Structure formats: structure tokens, C-alpha cells
Image (cartoon, rainbow, N blue to C red):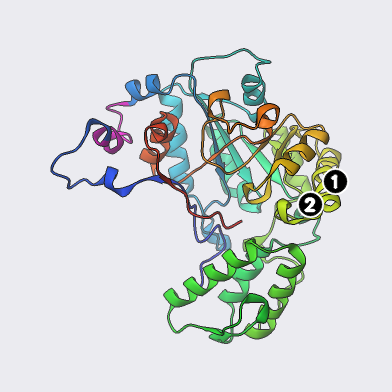
Amino acid sequence: MAAGPGRGGGERGYRLDSEDLEVGAVLRSPRQLIIELAGTDILAPMLRAVGRGLVTIFTLHRFTDPEHGVIGLDPVALANQLAYLRRYRYRLLGLSEVVERITGRNGHSTSPAVVFTVDDGYGDFVRIGAPVFAEYDCPVTVFIPTGFLDGRLWLWWDRVTYLFANARRTSFFAPELGDRPYQWSTPEELARVQQYVLDALERVPAPQREAAIAALSGQLEVELPETPPAAYAPMSWDEVRKMARRGVTFGPHTVTHPILPLTPPDICKWEIEESYRRLRLETSSTVPVFCYPAGQARQRELQAVQAAGFSAAVTTIPGYAAPHGIRDWGALRRFALPRFPTTEDRPHLVNVVAGLARLRPRIRRPRPRK
């Protein structure tokens, strides 16, 4: 069976190398012991001191919602993480506050700060995620592909997942996806083929991707519904306004979620500017921060976002959103703010907010499948 609705069947993230987490090692360095104990309360005060001055932005996508068949971040795990951050007095800030802090318009604090963002605007945020953030009085910003909420499309990776989950055949040959046939006989083989297709389609321009999905639909003998089923559906604009009244803020995430470096200049400009215009029409709780689809951007995209009047933009490059932690883009660096993924593993979260990710030069980064 193919992975269910969600980002590859759940949140994928960066982690420290497994050799650092080897519990059975005869000799462990102090750093290894810290990593192993990070999820407990034993070292919490010390770790908070280690993280002084750090600004950590996390990104999430889906929240586990069994009633709608969604696999994502377990809300119990999220609550556990937020409780830890509150208990040890990490500053849970809104994204706009952090942008002001980074750019020097709001001074500098040595208290470690944490920000949560959610990409794509799925309905499970409203049903599952938002109540958890509200319970812990934690600000959160949701990045919206406006065409998704307007009903113009459902997101391409969800269409691929739907096709494999409902496939009537166990093989296909689509020239748009390579020059050889693909087949499977076990769920594991199906999952590998599906992942190959998702990875391949992320690297091609939107017109080519749409042609490939249409070919795949025919090969697998599955008709795609015109609108996304409940498991893949977005929140509504009414729900956006409802969440805004409860303190949630929103940022633009393009109109159709293309990989911007693969688009022509005029399309890139339109996707950025039109999504900002459309979002501001629907809610006054729009923040002037852009989110690049799949976190992918080059200098052209950074300049286009700056020209569109944004204060900052976020990527999916792991790192700390402080001046010393941003890739050296010079005057454009605030348009390439890094973010860490959120996982259900509390030690992972604690390692990140405490700054231990800086101690490890090799961080494994699975390819984002967005």
C-alpha cells in the first residue's frame, strides 16, 4: 500500500549521525551523552544556557488525523514538545517578531527563541494542529498556496500519492518518467517506485510534471477527482479568517506551488506577487514573509521577493535564523532564512533549540519531497 496522505507518510527531518546516538557504544564522548540525555529534564537548564541568543524556526506540514486518513505529526508529540519549551522558558515568538529581531529593528535578546511555521494550508491544521498551538499559547504562521484554497488545484504530490494508493495495475511505462517500465509486487516495492516518481517530478518544470501525472493516471487506470478528497483538502478561506481571529498569522506560498527556480522570470514574478495580493485580500493577518515552495530559491527568487515588498522569506535549509547563522547572501540574507523540520522525537527538538546541531558538521538532509 502506498504511503497515505502526508509528507511521505509522516514528517521527515534532519538528524545527527547515528554514530552519535549509539547507545551501545562502550565509550561515549560528553557530546554523545548530552545528545542521548537531551530529551530528559536532567540537562534542560544547561541546554537552555547553551542555546542563548539562538533563533530557531521550525517547519511542519501535516498533522495526524485518523478520521480523515492523514498521517503526519502526532498532536500528542507536538504538545509534549511545546510543554517542554514552555517549562524551560524558551521564548515562543511570532514570525514577524523574529524578523524584526534578526534585522535589528527590535533589539537583540540573549533568550533562546523558537518559531513554528506550517506549510501548505491543509485542513488538518485547523482540526488538529491549531488547537494544540492555542493550548500552549504558541504563535504559529501558516504559509498558503492561494490557488489551493481557491479550489484551482490540488497539490501535485498528493495527486501522485492518490494514483498509487488507488492503482489498478502493478506496473507502468510512461516516457515522461524515464525509458524503462516500473513494476512492483510488494508494498515496499510500491513505496520505492512512488518515491522515485515523486523525486523525479520535483526536478522538472510544472508543464512537464503535469504531462507526466496525466500519463501516470492513464497507465495506472485511475481517474483523478477534480477536487481533492478530504484527506488532501485545504482549509477554507473562512477557516483562515477564523484562525486569524485566534491569533494565527499567514504568509504567501505562491499560487500553484511551482519550484520557482524552474519557472520563467514572468511566471516566477507572478507567483510571488499574486499570492501576496490574494492572501491580503482574504485576511489582514498576512505577514510580509514569503515561503519558497520546497524551500528552493536562487538569487533571482530572492531578488524577486525583495522587489515584491516582503520583509523576509524562509527556505528549508537547516540552520539558525540569526545573522551569524544565515547563508551569506549579503543584503539578501533575510530572504533566505533557514528552518529546521519538526519531528515527533523530543530529543531531536531539544538538540536543535539548544544549538547542538552546530556541533556536528555533518547533518543528514533527506531530499524534501514537496
Q: Residue at x 61, y 43 (%)?
A: 118
Marking on residue 255: 2
Q: Is residue 41 magenta?
A: yes
Left or right: 116 as drawn, with respect to 79: right
Where is 294 relative to 196, above or below?
above
Quarter of the image holding residue 159?
bottom right
Amino acid at the residue labelled 1: Glu
Q: Position of residue 185 (x, y in %)?
A: 44, 84
Helix or strand or loop: what does disc 2 sit on?
A: loop
On the rendered structure, is 224 left or right of 136? right
Instruction: Locate residue 12 relative to residue 230 in the image: left or right.
Output: left
Residue 315 percent location from the top left of the image: 62, 41
Please, what secondary structure does the residue beneath circle 1 have?
A: helix
Q: How many marks overall? A: 2
Q: Nearer the viewer, residue 93 or 87?
A: 93
> Looking at the image, is 197 positioned above or below residue 321?
below
Q: Mark 1 vs mark 2: which is more N-terminal?
A: 2
Asked if the residues shown at circle 1 and circle 2 are in contact, with their CB atoms under 8 angstroms apart, the answer is: yes
Near-viewer residue (360 or 97):
360
Residue identified by numbered label 1: 274
Query: Which label sits on residue 223?
Result: none
Residue 346 in view here: yes
Residue 242 rendering spot, x and y as whole percentages: 73, 40
What is the crowding at mark 1: few (fewer than 14 residues within 10 Å), some, or many (at least 20)?
A: some
- The range drawn in magenta is 32-43
Location of the C terminus by quadrant is bottom right
Would you say residue 262 sits in the magenta stretch? no
**Residue type highlighted by circle 2:** Val
Rendering coords of residue 56 (x, y %) = 52, 31
Please give the name of the residue rendered at 65% of the width and 48% of the height, measured from the top-left corner.
296
Q: Residues within 10 Å of mark 2 (few under 14, many from 20)?
A: many
